[in-house]
Image (spheres, rainbow, N blue to C red):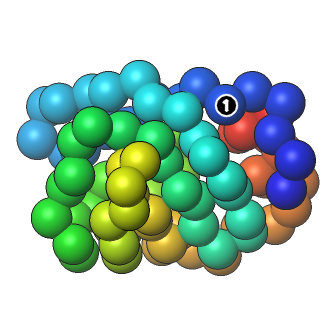
Amino acid sequence: IKLQQQKLTINYGDGRIEECNALDVSISGASIESTTKPLLGTQITVGKLRAEVKRHHSRGFGVAFTDIQQVQAIRKYFG
């Protein structure tokens, strides 16, 4: 999905909140640019969407959304 805005808020669920860039977003997950590397399996919130950290990469980490999203919802939350 082509993004209009790349900035998003990550809530780690332990009180930490971080502003990050979305590198890529699909209906099932997202790639997040961040210096933080949460443990695999960590439950977080990406914008308003619940997600689970599934992988790490050189620029950050990848998540799978807990609930598969409709394209309209992705556009609403990520531009």
Question: Where does residue 35 sit, x and y in percent of width and height?
Answer: 27, 37
Residue 45 in view: no
Q: Residue furthest front?
A: 58
Left or right of 3? Residue 39 is left
- The image shows residue 53, relative to residue 14, as above or below, that is below
| Local secondary structure at mark 1 | loop
Indicate the quadrant containing the C terminus: top left, top right, bottom left or bottom right.
top right
Left or right of 5? Residue 46 is left
Q: Residue at x 36, y 39 (%)?
A: 34
Indicate the quadrant containing the N terminus: top left, top right, bottom left or bottom right.
bottom right
Question: Where does residue 14 sit, x and y in percent of width and height?
Answer: 11, 41
The total of numbered circles placed on residues is 1
Question: Where does residue 6 sit, x and y in percent of width and height?
Answer: 67, 31
Q: Quadrant of residue 11?
A: top left
Q: Residue at x 41, y 48 (%)?
A: 59
Left or right of 18? Residue 26 is right
Q: Residue at x 81, y 66 (%)?
A: 70
Question: Where does residue 40 sit, x and y in percent of width and height?
Answer: 21, 72
Q: Which residue is mark 1?
A: 6
**Callout 1: 10 Å neighbours few (<14), some, many (20+)?**
some
Q: Residue at x 15, y 64 (%)?
A: 39
Q: Nearer the viewer, residue 46 or 60?
A: 60
Q: Residue furthest left?
A: 14
- The image shows residue 19, relative to residue 73, as above or below, that is above
